[in-house]
Each structure stands twice: as C-alpha cells, then as structure tokens.
Amino acid sequence: MYYKTVYQSPVGTLTLACDETGGSLVGLWIEGQKYYGGAIRETMTENSGLPVFGSTKKWLDRYFAGGRPDCHELPLAPVGSEFRQEVWAILREIPYGKVTTYGDIAKKAAANMGRKSMSGQAVGGAVGHNPISIIIPCHRVIGGNGSLTGYAGGIQAKIQLLELEGVDLSRMSVPKTGSAL
C-alpha cells in the first residue's frame, strides 16, 4: 500500500507518495507529468497527515521561497533498477543553481559501475523516469549542446525551476520538437 497527498506549487499541483510505513518518500510528480506514478502499480490512498509528507512540504516551501534545502534532508526511497538508482544518486549530487549534461552523468555512472562507457540515451531514460522530481533534481540536466530537453514535467516547469535557482539560461535553448515540450 502507498499513501499520497498533494502540494500546490508555482509549477502546478504536485502529488507526493510514500511507502506503506509512511517513513520514506517514493514519489513526487507534477500534475500531467510523463511517467506519473512511476513504478507504483498499486492504488495510492490519500493520507496527508503522515510525518514524511509534513517534512517534504516544509522542504518544498523552503525551496520555492528561494532557499537551498538539501535533498539528503529527506528520507527518499525511489523505486527502480540498480542502474536507475545509480543515475538518481548522481542527480542528487548536482549542486543547487548548477546544471550538468546527460553525457557527464553517463561518464560518471560508467566510472561508478566499473564500465568503460555508458549510453547517454540510457542515462536519459533513467533521468526521465526519476520518480521524485524537483527533490532529486533532474531539472538540472541539459543536453550537451545546451538544449533544455528531456524534462518529464514539461519544458516550462524546467525553465521555472532553473530560473528559481538563478541559472543563467541565456546560452541554453528550447528544443523545437520533442516530448519535453
């Protein structure tokens, strides 16, 4: 069993989900986000009174007020394969107000997993399936050419989040086509 609650944010309604113990956050999705619900195949029951939801909402309040809360402050338990867990761990290390590329994540993941190389496309898939968006900052990942592509929550939300963090978007571009729009 999983529990859920909602949070009204500047980028839209967010759904938060936790595991059956109520101890760990397993999901945070923007309304209408691609892959909404992620790997959770069970019905999520409304229960806004759980402590993990309270601490997550306080974290989000600080974030949207311009603070710099650290993702390591919250008990996170995203559901995914070992490879995806590796990519999501790398995402957690991207500093507030900074961006990195899919290629850079692929190099780091390859090194961490003892491989010579890693597919940027595979990394893109793992980033796109991140079940705890905003807190695990997948919005901080851009294309190698500066394209703001690949955000499952939508390009406008990605732009809003990066602007909130003070990222200079002047050298970045919005893709003309693709699913991130």
Image (cartoon, rainbow, N blue to C red):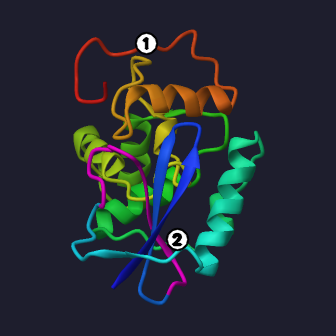
Q: CA distance from mark 2 to mark 1?
A: 32 Å
Q: Position of residue 167 (x, y in %)?
A: 64, 25
Q: Residue at x 51, y 25 (%)?
A: 159
Return the x and y of residue 89 as percentages of the image width and height.
48, 60
Residue indicated by mark 1: 173
Q: Is residue 108 left or right of residue 178?
A: right
User: Magenta segment, principal secondary structure?
Assistant: loop
Magenta stretch in the rendered image: 22-37
Q: Residue at x 23, y 16 (%)?
A: 177
Q: Secondary structure at mark 2?
A: loop
* Quadrant hosting residue 74: bottom right
Amino acid, disc 2: Leu
Cβ–Cβ under 8 Å for marks 2 and 1: no
* Residue, disc 2: 76
Q: Image quadrant of residue 97? A: top right
Q: Is residue 23 magenta?
A: yes
Does 29 appear above or below 138? Answer: below
Q: Residues within 10 Å of mark 2 (few under 14, many from 20)?
A: some
Q: Residue at x 41, y 87 (%)?
A: 20
Identify the secondary structure beneath mark 1: loop
